[in-house]
Image (cartoon, grey):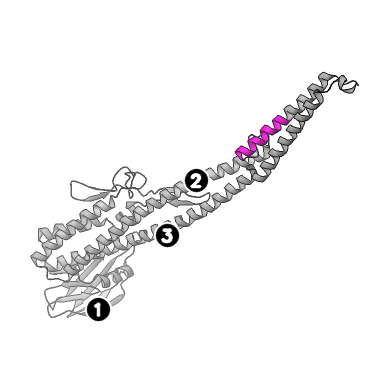
Amino acid sequence: MRISTSMQYTSQLRYMQSANTRLDKASEKYNTGLKFQNSGEDPSGMSQKIKYTGDISAFEQYKLNSHMVAGYLSEEETALGSIWTALSSAQSRLHQAVNGTHDKNSLTALAEDIEQTINQLYDLMNTRNAEGEYIFAGSDSSRPAFTLASDGNYYCQANGSVRYVQVSPTVVVQSSDSALNVFQNVPLSHTMKDTANPAITSSYIENFEDFNDLYNQFYSSKTGANNDITIEVNGGKFEVKSPNGNVIGGGEVTKKGVIEYKGMVFETGDQNYNGNITVTLDKPKKDNILNTLTNVVKEIKNGNLGRNELTQMLSEAQISVSNCKDNVDMYRGQVGARAANIDNIITSNESLSVVKQTARAGVTEIDAYEAVSELLMVQNALQVSQSSFAKIHQSNLFDYI
């Protein structure tokens, strides 16, 4: 086959065009540091790149979520700590009042202190975060957790819902707590009421620790359960029977006609009192501590309670404050545990994100030495091709005559 001059030109030009294309690709790899630009160049590599890129983006979102939750938990832990401190102060003042003389000046000072504590607690229970959300309001964070009504009582508006945030591919963390659980559904001190035949002068609880032991032993929450404890008094002595009729204790009536049993005091007014006293253990009650303390202030200002009644009210409030403190402390511990877990998750996410980035780089990024070597090789090949083309096509038949 005869090779014409045009065929030689065409063949050489095609080769140089191909070499130029290879040079462009080699230059692109060198400049971008990437092995490929589209799926046509490496379908498998592009598929892996998309997967790793998606994973890396997800970890970036998890990082943002984790830091956001860490901020929420820090704010909640701080608020709970301040609430616990305020409750401790109120508990201390109530304890002093129970053991004090109950003079007018000390009671007035107590009422003023408790009023300030109520305002402080109300403000803390309605704490807002940086976004203006009420952190204890439950799922509806746009309205306060507590509101003060016209009747002077505090009402909880928070629902029992809490928010969760995903902070890793497999971990979802609770980012809030509801005031309904933390502050509202807190047990108040146990109480009782009595019916005597014949009637007695008065009754009250003097020692709640002893009374609570009795209450916890014999109170039943079953429907229709008998929660009556009977005290039978005869001839200067008394016998105590459980709801089942079993004798559980007894003693003697004092010279002043007083009966004392398990923290309860019954003043009959007569050492020779004979009759029955039925003690009914009240159903457990729950309420927020704001209402409990408000009632203390109200009764102190009214001044209608006798010494024994006042002491019982203050003791009841002291128990209720203690229960609220315990509940706050429990939730504060849970928040602290979640915060510590978040710190570990943040560290883990950062490590996993680096692993994904390294894996993507292994698939998509070209080695610098390899890129330089390939670029130089293609450049040299193109230069040789250009030199050969020029030399060949400068020749003619006269060169051989």
Residue drawn at (32%, 63%), measured in percent from left and top?
326
Q: Tell me which secondary structure the magenta stretch mostly adopts.
A: helix
Q: Is residue 69 above or below residue 214?
A: above
**Mark 2: amino acid:** Glu
Residue drawn at (52%, 43%), measured in percent from left and top?
57
Q: Is residue 30 magenta?
A: yes
- From the viewer's perspective, is 225 left or right of 23? left
Quadrant in the picture for the N terminus? top right
**First along the sequence among labels 1 and 2:** 2
Element under disc 1: strand
Element under disc 2: helix
**Mark 3: amino acid:** Ala
Mark 2–mark 3 CB contact (< 8 Å): no
Residue ID for mark 2: 60
Circle 3 Cα neighbour tier, 10 Å, few/some/many (<14 / 14–19 / ≥20) = few
Residue ID for mark 1: 250
Q: Identify the magenta region.
A: 19-35
**First along the sequence among labels 3 and 1:** 1
Q: Is residue 14 magenta?
A: no
Residue drawn at (34%, 53%), measured in percent from left and top?
75
Residue ID for mark 3: 337
Residue 231 locus on image (x, y percent):
23, 73
Q: Which of labels 2 and 3 is toward the front?
A: 2
Residue at the front extreme? 401
